[in-house]
Image (cartoon, grey):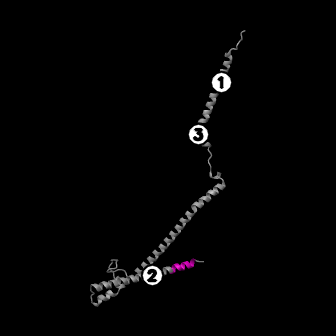
Amino acid sequence: MSMSTPTPSPTYGDCVASLRTSLSFLESSVATLGAGVQDFPRLSSVLKTVRHYELIPQPTLAAAEASLRDEIGPFVALLLDRADRHLERQARRIETLKARAELNAGRLSHYPPSSSGGGGRAGSGYDDVIGGKESKGKGSGKPLDGGAALRAKVVRQRKEALKYSVERLELEVQQKERELRLRLEQQP
């Protein structure tokens, strides 16, 4: 008995054809997938979400502001205090300079201008106006020896320094009185 065996070729042929069709579909799918993935880095940057100010929740924003205020607030207050102190110091310095200028103007107005044109104290008649002794001493005809002349010069210099100090203190008193009047006027 012979058994007939079916021929494998038509069955294998159908399998091979089906396999080739599947393979072509697979290649087409890979090509489509490759084309879709090729632009993926650009798409990821385009589609990436960006958090804007409006998108942050209000409690998070309030907490961040409070934290920033707590962190920076003392430094801002310190800098403002330093600026205020510096401004007060500068205002006092300006007032001192104004008072000194007034004092110098007052001192200069008491003395006649120099006739020699030198502008300095020596030989300008300053000692004659201040001391008065020099003109008396010259007029008496009795010359002073070296030690007595030196002592007279020291005495004149002390007298000038004391007059200057008195004038300066008087102007300072006037300045303080003006400041006190201004403060009293500014108070309600």
Classify the position of the C terminus by image quarter.
Answer: bottom right
Closer to us: 16 or 42: 16
Magenta region: which residues? 177-186
Percent of width and height locating residue 21: 65, 24
Question: How much space separates mark 2 and mark 3, taking CA atoms?
Answer: 84 Å
The residue under the point 62% across, 52% down is 53
Q: Residue 132, image x and y in percent?
A: 34, 87
Task: Assess whether residue 94 is covered by the magenta stretch.
Answer: no
**What kind of element bears circle 3?**
helix
Residue 85 position in % (x across, y down):
52, 69
137 vs 114: above or below? below
Amino acid at dot 1:
Thr
Q: Residue furthest front?
A: 1
Local packing at callout 3 (Cα closer than 10 Å; few below 14, some 14-19, many 20+) is: few
**Residue under label 3:** 41
48 w.r.t. 117: above or below: above
**Looking at the image, is mark 1 or mark 2 earlier in the sequence?**
1
**Residue 138 horizontal/vertical position (percent):** 29, 87
The reply, left or right, for residue 37 in relation to residue 150 is right
* Amino acid found under the numbered disc labelled 2: Leu
Residue under numbered circle 1: 21
Front residue of 159/186: it is 159
